[in-house]
Image (spheres, rainbow, N blue to C red):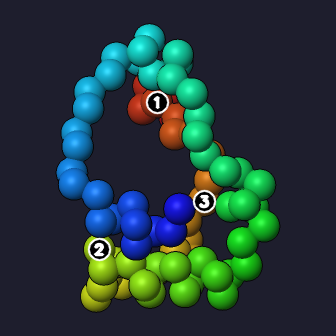
Amino acid sequence: MSFAKLNAQPERIVRHSDKEMCGLRDESNWKRAEAATQEQIERAIASDPDEADLLVDWSAAWAGNAVPQDEA
């Protein structure tokens, strides 16, 4: 499913507890995400109307878990 099709769907906000979230099925296509080139990612972002005029500098971003303040 394309990003444009996802954005065309009506908004639906659903709340779940942590326990409920653990039981939900992960529908992420991680192989597709990992295989995407930088050009494909940039093209998908550029075609997403929700991203229009949004300028973000991701050069300092990192992936990982946040450390609780009391452990830092």
Q: CA distance from mark 1 to mark 2?
A: 31 Å
Residue located 47% across and 79% down the image: 45
Q: Disc 3 or disc 2, which is closer to the eye?
A: 2
Q: Which residue is mark 1?
A: 68
Residue located 42% across and 15% down the image: 20
Q: Earlier in the sequence, mark 3 or mark 1?
A: 3
Instruction: Give the total of numbered labels.
Output: 3
Residue located 21% across and 51% down the image: 11
Out of 61 and 6, give the one closest to the viewer.
6
Q: Is residue 59 left or right of residue 19?
A: right
Residue located 77% across and 55% down the image: 31
x then y, percent, for residue 5? 40, 66
Q: Is residue 68 above or below residue 46?
A: above
Q: Name the element at disc 1.
A: loop
Q: Which residue is mark 3?
A: 62
Q: Amino acid at mark 2?
A: Asp
Q: Is residue 5 left or right of residue 42?
A: left
What number is the disc on residue 50?
Answer: 2
